[in-house]
Amino acid sequence: MERIVSQHSIWHFDTDRRRFRRVPKGVADFEPVPDHVWEPYHRLDVDSDRGSFTVILNEAGTRLLEAWFETVSEAAGGDSTAEMHLTAVDATDATDGADATDAADAADEPR
């Protein structure tokens, strides 16, 4: 079992059974948890250099969840959640060659 704390949530990963659950901070987190609360995932990628992690939900890698570690968000000055319009992502991708995932909202939201 692996536990990761992000800006807004506590993530629990059952690596043996390839399933995870996300509990928003401030919500009671009880154990044991019924099976229907867990979600399957294909792979967990932790990027310590960026201070983030990505949960790849399917084998094709087309469904992802990305979040920043809590310490990274705090070091950046607090709450880093902000609305981002897709045109801004496209413009960033087109102008500097950055991967669109770099500009995606990193606040525990699906991409």
Image (spheres, grey):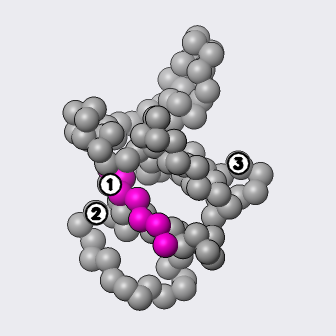
Q: In which quadrant of the rendered view does residue 96 lie?
A: top right
Sequence-first tag of 1 and 3: 1
Q: Judge the density around disc 2: few (<14), some (14-19), many (≥20) Cα neighbours within 10 Å.
A: some
Helix, strand, or loop for circle 1?
loop
Q: Judge the density around disc 3: few (<14), some (14-19), many (≥20) Cα neighbours within 10 Å.
A: few
Apparent side of residue 23 relative to residue 99 in the rendered image (left or right)? left
Q: Is residue 27 above or below residue 97?
A: below
Q: In which quadrant of the rendered view does residue 5 lie?
A: bottom left
Apparent side of residue 98 relative to residue 53 in the rendered image (left or right)? right
Instruction: Kindly check if marks 1 and 3 are in contact, taking CB atoms under 8 A apart as contact.
Output: no
The disc labelled 3 sits on which kind of residue? Thr
The residue segment tinted magenta is: 1-7
Q: CA distance from mark 2 to mark 1?
A: 6 Å
Q: CA distance from mark 1 to mark 3?
A: 23 Å
Q: Judge the density around disc 1: few (<14), some (14-19), many (≥20) Cα neighbours within 10 Å.
A: many
Q: CA distance from mark 2 to mark 3?
A: 27 Å
Helix, strand, or loop for circle 3?
loop
Rendering coords of residue 93 (x, y %): 60, 20
The disc labelled 1 sits on which kind of residue? His
Q: What's the residue at 32%, 54% (across, down)?
A: 8
Q: Nearer the viewer, residue 54 or 106?
A: 54
Mark 1 sits on what residue?
8
Q: What's the residue at 37%, 47% (across, down)?
A: 69
Q: In which quadrant of the rendered view does residue 76 lie?
A: top left
The disc labelled 2 sits on which kind of residue? Lys
